[in-house]
Image: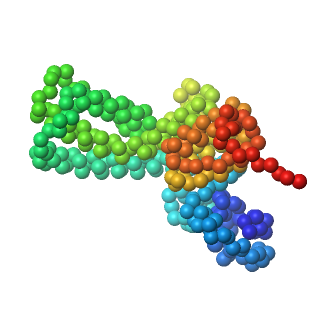
Amino acid sequence: PLQMIDEWVGTLTRQGAQEWWDQETNQILDYDAVVDLYGDQIPRFEQPELPSWLDKLLASVSVHIIETQRLSVPPRASAGPRYTPSRQRGETTTAVNLLAQDLASRIRSALAAYAERSQNLDRTFPSRLLEEGQLPAEATQATIRERYEIQGENRARLIGAGLLDPGEQIVLPKKRLNQTERRVLWNYLADVDAKLEVLYPIVDKVDLFRAVINSKYVGKSITVSREEGFTVLTDRSDILDARFLSSGEQHELVLAYRLLFNVQPGSLILIDEPELSLHVSWQQMFLPDLQRISRTAQLDFLVATHSPIIIGNRWDLTEKLAIED
């Protein structure tokens, strides 16, 4: 049925496993909407009844297919209503630029949540400090200084990822802290942990996104900011319009971003012949990158490939499919 839709309805362009862009209405349609609107153009077919076990399995797993063509996107606003046209019909934009805007929006949302939690904690800090009972036994001199150093490292990581502005780090005095000082600092450190944890989910993805892309780009790299989302810089620190990246570089960027930011955790990702768009050296990095993304984004992958370079030394993960005559 899906192939028949692609074949018989010329105004539809496949965008996902069961999503099509309707050039006439400038909307993204799911399978049911296509049948409702264009069923009279599709030869009649009978939908086979699935075994109950398969029907239950499909209902429990979110499946995404990585399409070959990823660099052009339909004119749909990523943050707007699903079926509301955002531009004039027929106008398209590059996926790279759209994803940069998407990341900027995500960073602003994370920072808004961070600001809200910070305000709530700062407002209630005096009353909570006065209401606290006995100082915990683990609030020792060494533990406080260790937690302070760890928070400094985490803050530096967030600054490097473009999520926080650089600021002067307050240095703890080297003198021995009395009980009152330890009590104040212990509560302060707990509040800082609570504030920063709001940003950890997105910084984990941002850091991995930058690492995956920058390990492949030569003479250029990506940097992240709340204003631009991500920007491509040359080695001379000149801004490079992402549209002028090679198709291979754009494919890598779009794939990594969508896997990290646009797919729900627990999803199954289907990728067909990734070697078709990858340089040999990038093929060697493909599986390790997927494994890192899998851990961070909590995804499962099923890859169909003819390339032993993609597989590398992980033949234990493979199932050979033989076609019989």
Residue at (72, 34) in percent of width and height = 309
Task: Tell me where residue 168 appears, x and y as whole percent.
Answer: 29, 29
Q: In the figure, residue 13 lies in which quadrant?
A: bottom right
Q: In the figure, residue 284 lies in which quadrant?
A: top right
Question: Which quarter shows the N terminus?
Answer: bottom right
Left or right side of 218 for 304: right
Residue at (85, 52) in percent of width and height = 324
Question: Is the residue 268 above or below the residue 43 in the image?
Answer: above
Question: Which quarter shows the C terminus?
Answer: bottom right
Q: Residue furthest right?
A: 325
Residue at (53, 53) in percent of width and height = 266
Task: Tell me where residue 55 appears, x and y as whole percent.
Answer: 62, 68
* In-front residue for pair 84/263: 263
Q: In the figure, residue 38 lies in which quadrant?
A: bottom right
Left or right side of 110 for 78: right
* In-front residue for pair 245/170: 170
Q: Residue furthest top?
A: 174
Question: Is the residue 146 above or below the residue 277 in the image?
Answer: above
* In-front residue for pair 21/239: 21
Task: Tell me where residue 204 appears, x and y as whole percent.
Answer: 45, 40
- Snapshot colouring: rainbow
Whether residue 126 is visible, yes or no, is: no
* In-front residue for pair 30/223: 30
Whether residue 268 is visible, yes or no, is: yes
Task: Tell me where residue 12 appears, x and y as whole percent.
Answer: 71, 65
Residue at (36, 34) in percent of width and height = 154
